Image: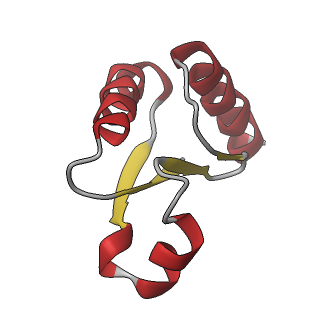
Amino acid sequence: MRVRLYTKPGCSLCDELKADLQALQSEIGFVVEECNIEANQADFARFRYLIPVLDIEGGPLLHPPHDFVTLRHALLAAGRQVDA
């Protein structure tokens, strides 16, 4: 399963979400693709005031605020959808 994280440098909320993703990665098994919104004009226009945003393959687009329990639940549910 792939997870796309929309972020930008210097974002402390992004760093917290990255740490949570790393903690869950071995349990759930997914690949994180980090997208710097400052490197893509369309991403910047779309997510400028929303980061960090997490786009989970087979699952929801998660906007802040993020918490570990909700994140884990969303990843597990999406993993079941991808495997089906």
Q: From the viewer's perspective, is residue 19 above or below residue 27?
A: below
Q: Position of residue 27 (x, y in %)?
A: 44, 18
How is this picture coloured? Answer: secondary structure
Q: From the viewer's perspective, is residue 44 above or below residue 65?
A: below
Tell me where residue 34 sits by quadrant. bottom left
Residue plotted at (69% across, 41% down): 83
Q: How many marks?
A: 0
Q: Position of residue 20 (x, y in %)?
A: 38, 24
Tell me where residue 80 sits by quadrant. top right
Residue plotted at (65% across, 36% down): 79
Q: Residue furthest front?
A: 49
In which quadrant is the C terminus drawn? top right
Q: Position of residue 13 (x, y in %)?
A: 37, 36
Q: Nearer the viewer, residue 80 or 73?
A: 73
Q: Residue furthest top?
A: 69
Q: Nearer the viewer, residue 29 or 74?
A: 74
Q: Position of residue 61 (x, y in %)?
A: 67, 50
Q: From the viewer's perspective, is residue 78 above or below residue 20?
A: below
Residue plotted at (51% across, 84% down): 42
Q: Residue furthest left?
A: 10
Tell me where residue 39 sits by quadrant. bottom left
Q: From the viewer's perspective, is residue 7 above or below residue 64?
A: below
Q: Residue furthest bottom?
A: 41
Judge left or right: residue 78 versus residue 46: right
